[in-house]
Image: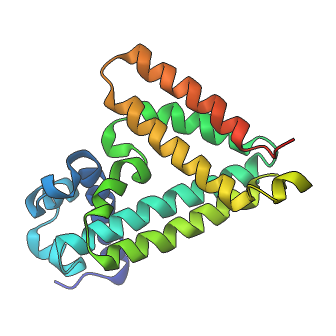
Amino acid sequence: MRYSAEHKKRTQAKVIAAAGQVFRKEGYGGAGIDALTKAAGVTNGAFYGHFRSKSEAFRVAVLAGLEELRAGISALKAEHPQGWLKNFVNYYLGYKRTCDLGESCALPSLSADVMRTDNETRDAYTEELEHLIAEIAAGLPEGTPADRQGTSRDDRAILLLALLTGGVTLARAVSNPALSEKIAELVTTEALRGGKPEA
Protein backbone atom coordinates (compact mmCIF):
# COMPACT_ATOMS: atom_id res chain seq x y z
CA MET A 1 0.00 0.00 0.00
CA ARG A 2 1.34 3.40 -1.01
CA TYR A 3 1.02 6.30 1.41
CA SER A 4 0.38 9.85 0.26
CA ALA A 5 3.02 12.54 0.59
CA GLU A 6 0.82 14.18 3.24
CA HIS A 7 0.69 10.96 5.29
CA LYS A 8 4.48 10.62 5.07
CA LYS A 9 4.88 14.22 6.18
CA ARG A 10 2.56 13.71 9.17
CA THR A 11 4.37 10.51 10.12
CA GLN A 12 7.75 12.22 9.93
CA ALA A 13 6.51 15.10 12.13
CA LYS A 14 5.19 12.54 14.62
CA VAL A 15 8.54 10.70 14.66
CA ILE A 16 10.48 13.97 15.10
CA ALA A 17 8.25 15.07 18.00
CA ALA A 18 8.52 11.67 19.67
CA ALA A 19 12.28 11.56 19.16
CA GLY A 20 12.62 15.02 20.71
CA GLN A 21 10.72 13.88 23.78
CA VAL A 22 12.71 10.65 24.16
CA PHE A 23 16.07 12.38 23.69
CA ARG A 24 15.12 15.05 26.26
CA LYS A 25 14.16 12.38 28.80
CA GLU A 26 16.80 9.74 28.15
CA GLY A 27 19.67 11.64 26.56
CA TYR A 28 21.29 10.57 23.32
CA GLY A 29 23.07 7.61 24.90
CA GLY A 30 19.99 6.34 26.72
CA ALA A 31 17.61 6.53 23.76
CA GLY A 32 17.73 3.47 21.53
CA ILE A 33 15.94 3.02 18.23
CA ASP A 34 13.35 0.78 19.92
CA ALA A 35 12.46 3.55 22.39
CA LEU A 36 12.19 6.07 19.56
CA THR A 37 9.95 3.87 17.41
CA LYS A 38 7.77 2.88 20.36
CA ALA A 39 7.25 6.52 21.37
CA ALA A 40 6.33 7.44 17.80
CA GLY A 41 4.14 4.37 17.32
CA VAL A 42 5.98 3.29 14.17
CA THR A 43 7.99 0.25 13.09
CA ASN A 44 11.77 0.19 12.71
CA GLY A 45 11.22 0.12 8.95
CA ALA A 46 9.11 3.27 9.10
CA PHE A 47 11.74 4.97 11.27
CA TYR A 48 14.49 4.19 8.76
CA GLY A 49 12.21 5.38 6.00
CA HIS A 50 12.59 8.86 7.48
CA PHE A 51 16.09 8.79 9.02
CA ARG A 52 19.30 7.02 8.05
CA SER A 53 20.44 6.70 11.66
CA LYS A 54 19.79 7.59 15.28
CA SER A 55 22.28 10.45 14.97
CA GLU A 56 20.31 11.96 12.09
CA ALA A 57 17.09 11.68 14.11
CA PHE A 58 18.86 13.40 17.01
CA ARG A 59 20.09 16.21 14.77
CA VAL A 60 16.63 16.80 13.33
CA ALA A 61 15.03 16.68 16.80
CA VAL A 62 17.54 19.23 18.16
CA LEU A 63 16.99 21.59 15.24
CA ALA A 64 13.21 21.23 15.55
CA GLY A 65 13.48 22.08 19.25
CA LEU A 66 15.55 25.20 18.60
CA GLU A 67 13.24 26.27 15.79
CA GLU A 68 10.25 25.80 18.09
CA LEU A 69 11.91 28.09 20.64
CA ARG A 70 12.75 30.71 17.99
CA ALA A 71 9.21 30.61 16.59
CA GLY A 72 7.76 30.95 20.08
CA ILE A 73 9.88 34.03 20.75
CA SER A 74 8.89 35.51 17.39
CA ALA A 75 5.20 34.98 18.21
CA LEU A 76 5.61 36.54 21.67
CA LYS A 77 7.30 39.59 20.13
CA ALA A 78 4.41 39.99 17.69
CA GLU A 79 1.72 39.57 20.39
CA HIS A 80 3.42 41.60 23.14
CA PRO A 81 5.90 44.02 21.53
CA GLN A 82 6.59 45.85 24.80
CA GLY A 83 6.32 42.97 27.27
CA TRP A 84 7.55 39.97 25.29
CA LEU A 85 10.78 39.54 27.26
CA LYS A 86 9.04 39.43 30.65
CA ASN A 87 6.45 36.97 29.30
CA PHE A 88 9.19 34.80 27.80
CA VAL A 89 11.39 34.76 30.92
CA ASN A 90 8.42 34.00 33.19
CA TYR A 91 7.26 31.16 30.92
CA TYR A 92 10.77 29.77 30.57
CA LEU A 93 11.53 29.79 34.29
CA GLY A 94 7.97 28.83 35.19
CA TYR A 95 6.33 26.22 32.99
CA LYS A 96 9.45 25.16 31.07
CA ARG A 97 11.27 24.64 34.37
CA THR A 98 8.55 22.49 35.90
CA CYS A 99 6.99 20.64 32.95
CA ASP A 100 7.74 17.00 32.16
CA LEU A 101 11.33 16.65 30.96
CA GLY A 102 10.08 15.36 27.61
CA GLU A 103 8.36 18.73 27.05
CA SER A 104 11.30 20.84 28.26
CA CYS A 105 13.30 23.26 26.13
CA ALA A 106 15.88 21.79 23.77
CA LEU A 107 18.64 24.17 24.91
CA PRO A 108 19.13 22.91 28.47
CA SER A 109 18.02 19.34 27.80
CA LEU A 110 19.91 18.57 24.57
CA SER A 111 22.94 20.89 24.40
CA ALA A 112 25.16 18.65 26.53
CA ASP A 113 24.58 15.78 24.09
CA VAL A 114 25.27 18.08 21.13
CA MET A 115 28.75 18.71 22.60
CA ARG A 116 29.46 14.97 22.31
CA THR A 117 28.07 14.42 18.83
CA ASP A 118 29.43 14.71 15.28
CA ASN A 119 30.55 17.90 13.56
CA GLU A 120 27.56 17.92 11.21
CA THR A 121 25.17 18.13 14.18
CA ARG A 122 27.30 20.72 15.96
CA ASP A 123 27.48 22.86 12.80
CA ALA A 124 23.69 22.66 12.31
CA TYR A 125 23.14 23.47 16.01
CA THR A 126 25.49 26.46 15.75
CA GLU A 127 23.64 27.84 12.74
CA GLU A 128 20.24 27.44 14.40
CA LEU A 129 21.55 28.99 17.64
CA GLU A 130 22.77 32.00 15.66
CA HIS A 131 19.23 32.44 14.24
CA LEU A 132 17.87 32.25 17.78
CA ILE A 133 20.36 34.85 19.03
CA ALA A 134 19.41 37.18 16.17
CA GLU A 135 15.68 36.73 16.92
CA ILE A 136 16.17 37.67 20.56
CA ALA A 137 18.59 40.52 19.81
CA ALA A 138 16.13 42.09 17.38
CA GLY A 139 13.60 42.39 20.20
CA LEU A 140 15.94 43.93 22.76
CA PRO A 141 16.09 47.71 23.18
CA GLU A 142 18.94 49.64 21.64
CA GLY A 143 21.79 50.34 24.03
CA THR A 144 22.85 53.76 25.19
CA PRO A 145 25.99 55.28 23.64
CA ALA A 146 27.99 53.97 26.62
CA ASP A 147 26.45 50.52 26.19
CA ARG A 148 27.33 50.39 22.50
CA GLN A 149 30.99 50.49 23.50
CA GLY A 150 30.46 47.42 25.67
CA THR A 151 27.60 44.99 25.34
CA SER A 152 25.74 44.83 22.02
CA ARG A 153 22.21 43.52 21.59
CA ASP A 154 23.66 40.28 20.18
CA ASP A 155 25.90 39.97 23.24
CA ARG A 156 22.94 40.59 25.56
CA ALA A 157 20.95 37.93 23.68
CA ILE A 158 23.77 35.41 24.17
CA LEU A 159 24.02 36.27 27.87
CA LEU A 160 20.24 35.93 28.24
CA LEU A 161 20.20 32.47 26.62
CA ALA A 162 23.17 31.32 28.70
CA LEU A 163 21.56 32.61 31.90
CA LEU A 164 18.18 31.01 31.19
CA THR A 165 19.67 27.71 30.05
CA GLY A 166 21.98 27.47 33.05
CA GLY A 167 19.25 28.59 35.43
CA VAL A 168 16.75 26.02 34.20
CA THR A 169 19.40 23.29 34.28
CA LEU A 170 20.30 24.02 37.92
CA ALA A 171 16.67 24.50 38.98
CA ARG A 172 15.66 21.17 37.41
CA ALA A 173 18.65 19.30 38.84
CA VAL A 174 18.14 20.13 42.51
CA SER A 175 15.83 17.99 44.66
CA ASN A 176 14.84 20.85 46.95
CA PRO A 177 11.73 22.66 45.55
CA ALA A 178 12.46 25.79 47.58
CA LEU A 179 15.97 26.00 46.14
CA SER A 180 14.59 25.44 42.63
CA GLU A 181 12.18 28.35 43.16
CA LYS A 182 14.98 30.53 44.55
CA ILE A 183 17.17 29.84 41.51
CA ALA A 184 14.24 30.69 39.22
CA GLU A 185 13.54 33.94 41.07
CA LEU A 186 17.17 35.08 41.00
CA VAL A 187 17.63 34.17 37.34
CA THR A 188 14.35 35.91 36.42
CA THR A 189 15.48 39.13 38.11
CA GLU A 190 18.88 39.04 36.43
CA ALA A 191 17.47 38.08 33.01
CA LEU A 192 15.03 40.98 33.02
CA ARG A 193 17.70 43.40 34.22
CA GLY A 194 20.08 42.13 31.55
CA GLY A 195 17.55 42.67 28.79
CA LYS A 196 17.66 46.42 29.34
CA PRO A 197 20.34 48.74 27.99
CA GLU A 198 22.92 49.98 30.43
CA ALA A 199 22.15 53.37 31.93
In the image, taking residue 8 as reference, residue 72 lies left or right, namely right
Quadrant of image for the N terminus: bottom left
Count of marks overlaid on the render = 0
Is residue 14 visible to us here? no
Expressed as whole percent of the image width and height from the top left, the position of residue 14 reads: 31, 62
The residue that appears at 40% across and 53% down in the rendered structure is 106
For the point 53% across and 39% down, the residue is 92
Give whichever of 106, 161 is nearer the camera: 161
Q: Position of residue 77 (x, y in %)?
A: 72, 52
| Residue 98 position by quadrant | top left
User: Could you tell whether 93 is left or right of 74 in the image?
Assistant: left
Q: Residue at x 25, y 45 (%)?
A: 25
Please identify the residue farthest to the top as the structure is shown: 178
User: Image check: 155 left or right of 64?
Assistant: right
| Left or right, 167 with reference to 48 | right
Instruction: Give above or below for 179 relative to 162.
Output: above
Q: Is residue 174 above or below residue 148?
A: above
Q: Is residue 194 above or below residue 40?
A: above
Q: Is residue 168 above or below residue 142?
A: above
Q: Quadrant of residue 33?
A: bottom left
Query: Who is closer to the viewer here, 163 or 5?
Result: 163
